[in-house]
Image (cartoon, helix red, strand yellow):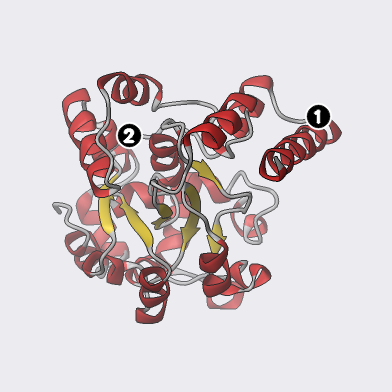
Amino acid sequence: MNKLLNQLLLFGFFIGSIKAMQIKPLHKIISDLQRFGLRPLDIFFRLTNGSSKYPKLLINSIPKAGTHLLERAIILHRSFYRKLLPTLTEENIKNYGGLESVSKKLTNSQIILAHLTYSKLKEKIIIENDIKCIFTIRDPRDILVSDAYHLGRQKKHRLYHLFKTLTINERINLLLRGDDKNNLMPFAEFINQFLGWLNSKAYVVKFEDLVINSHKRETTINNIYEFLGIILKKKEKNHILDNLISSASPTYRAGGQDRWSNYFSKDSLYEMSPSMTDVIENLGYKI
């Protein structure tokens, strides 16, 4: 009874917060309720079916590599829901006591999202707390373009003042070379910080495999849930596949693959940043 009361109080708090803000369209409010497992039917389902048989999950990724797409692929299975935390980064995780504190508080069926660079200590904490980790990657050239759009539009971002008046190509150039004065690391150097996850116990998912075509998408969904120890029923799988792509995503833009070629050629990219060749190959993409 106490657990039910806590869940319902959390639901009421969330609804009250939304009413106070009055800034989100209805379809995004509904999506948020689903993401955080706060729809009444979701709460009832967890309380009546139990959650201990489902793993704790960290979805980690390079920023703009499809974090929320993978989150959606998981929360569309009613047994999973996101913990009430923002996407964790190197900058904000200390506000929640650090990775070890967050990991110890995570319970079965809960998901946390993160953009955490690799270290042996982080991997050790995740393993010791029995958390499954999925690491999402994307062609770094498409991440670059997505980042350039994002930084020119997000007024709350600390670097908005640098990017707001620049063209998309000027933003790309600035990201590639970095800016020491404003603590902006060169793009290739930034990506390299995440590559250790490729050789960890994390399960690696390519963003492109979720968007390229229906056959690849279905295979990828099957593999993800197999990693989680879940055999999907046909109805569950169809529900995930039919509802995976959503404009309600908090970072939804155009998505897709090979969009970088609309902005620069292979040769011009390597002229601007020769180290990008290694980054692309290390992530398993063709030059």
User: What's the amino acid at mark 2?
Assistant: Gly
Q: Residue at x 53, y 32 (%)?
A: 48
Q: Which residue is drawn at 22% across and 43% down?
A: 226
Q: Residue 227 carries which label?
A: none
Q: Which of marks 2 and 1 is nearer the N terminus?
A: 1
Q: Determine which residue is flagged by label 1.
A: 22
Q: Which of 163 and 203 is in front in this view?
A: 203
- Residue 45 image position (x, y, % from top left): 53, 29
Separation (CA) of disc 2 from disc 1: 31 Å
Q: Which of 279 and 31 is in front in this view?
A: 31
Taking the image as shown, residue 49 lies to the left or right of residue 280, namely right
Q: In this view, does 171 lie above or below 236?
A: below
- Residue 86 image position (x, y, % from top left): 61, 53
Q: Residue at x 44, y 42 (%)?
A: 71
- Mark 2: which secondary structure? loop
Q: Which of 160 and 11 is in front in this view?
A: 11
- Residue 44 image position (x, y, % from top left): 59, 29
Taking the image as shown, residue 49 lies to the left or right of residue 277, namely right
- Residue 62 image position (x, y, % from top left): 40, 58
* Residue 176 in sight here: yes
